[in-house]
Amino acid sequence: MPNLKEIRNRITSVGSTMQITSAMKMVSAAKLKRAQDAITQMRPYAAKIKEILGNLSATLDLSENVYSEQREAKNILIVGITSNRGLCGGFNNNIIKRVGYLINEEYAGQNVHLLCLGKKIKDVYKRTPNYFINSTLEPLEDIYSDLSFERVSAIANELMRGFTAKDYDKVIVVYNRFVNAAAQVVETEQYLPIIPTTQENQSSTGDYIFEPSKDEIVADMIPKSLKIQLYKAIRDSFAAEHGARMTAMHKATDNAKELQKNLKLSYNKARQAAITNEILEIVGGAEALNA
């Protein structure tokens, strides 16, 4: 059994750790509120843009659109979205595992490239030049320091440029979709080429007057819709990160409390045993004097 000093040191250490995890939980909870408000306010807008685009394009042939061109997928670009920091449970590992599955299983044998949004996935793949690409954009892990639509638009423009230049035949986005503070779902979405929408799955376009023409409106809205789609994915991941970290720190705090409770019980038992031994030694010494 450890001596009393060792147990006291462990109790102090666990108490310090518990204070840190509790503080991190509160910080993540505050950040989660803002991130959750941002994604919940954006989702209806993104859904409406997609609905409008679907209604307008349902009667059009988008096969001639540069972003809808279907070609043999020889060059695949996977956009992996993780966080810059850890201590958020399996949040980052789930994305890294899904990206690994796509590279080694689903697109095995094809020319796969990887664009990393987040330091954690970049740290894993930066030593594998066969997959990892060095973007001409600003350091992509810095995007979370000032997450804005303008900065995400620059990334979306780069993805669209690479697709239209035929550097990539397909672009896949992998991210965590925010459900609630305790649940995140890994999503794998085809970003480019755009999947054609059938007229049966869309509501009626109604009696609209188009100015300019319907074709021009759709051609203008598709790039905007792609930018919004990527921005929504990053916003989803950002909110999911803080939810995962808050949950992980909550569990860590509870575990620290339980460990501290057990250590205090062990300390009391060791202290009681030491007192009992001292009493027995005194009694034994007294009996030896009386003998």
Image: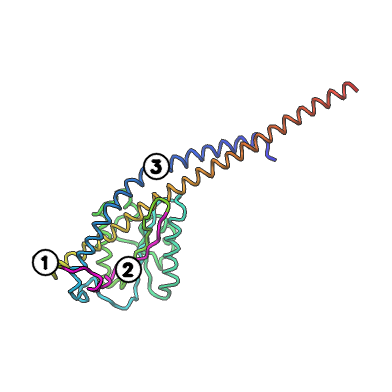
Asked where in the image residue 1 lies, by quadrant, the reply is top right
* Residue 52, disc: none
Q: Position of residue 28 (x, y in %)?
A: 39, 45
Residue at left offset 41%, top offset 41%: 26
- Name the residue at the bottom extreme: 72
Mark 2 vs mark 3, CA separation in Å: 34 Å
- Name the residue at the right extreme: 291
Residue 115, compared with residue 278, is above or below; it is below
Is residue 59 inside the magenta stretch? no
Q: Position of residue 236 (x, y in %)?
A: 34, 55
Residue 271, compared with residue 118, is above or below; it is above
| Label 2 crowd bin: few (<14), some (14–19), many (20+), radius 10 Å | some
Q: Residue under circle 3? A: 27
* Residue 190, disc: 2
Mark 2 vs mark 1, CA separation in Å: 30 Å
| Residue 176 horizontal side relative to residue 151, left or right | right
Asked where in the image residue 257 lies, by quadrant, the reply is top right
Asked if the residue under mark 3 is in contact with the one under mark 1, i.e. CB atoms within 8 Å, the reply is no
Three-letter amino acid code at the position of disc 1: Tyr
Q: Which range of residues does the magenta coloring cover?
A: 183-205
Q: Position of residue 288 (x, y in %)?
A: 87, 24
Residue at left offset 72%, top offset 29%: 275
Mark 1 vs mark 3, CA separation in Å: 49 Å
Of residues 167 and 68, the one nearer the viewer is 68
Q: Secondary structure at mark 3?
A: helix
* Residue 208, disc: 1
Of residues 192 and 114, the one nearer the viewer is 192
Three-letter amino acid code at the position of disc 2: Gln
Q: Secondary structure at mark 1?
A: loop
Three-letter amino acid code at the position of disc 3: Val
Q: Earlier in the sequence, mark 1 or mark 3?
A: 3
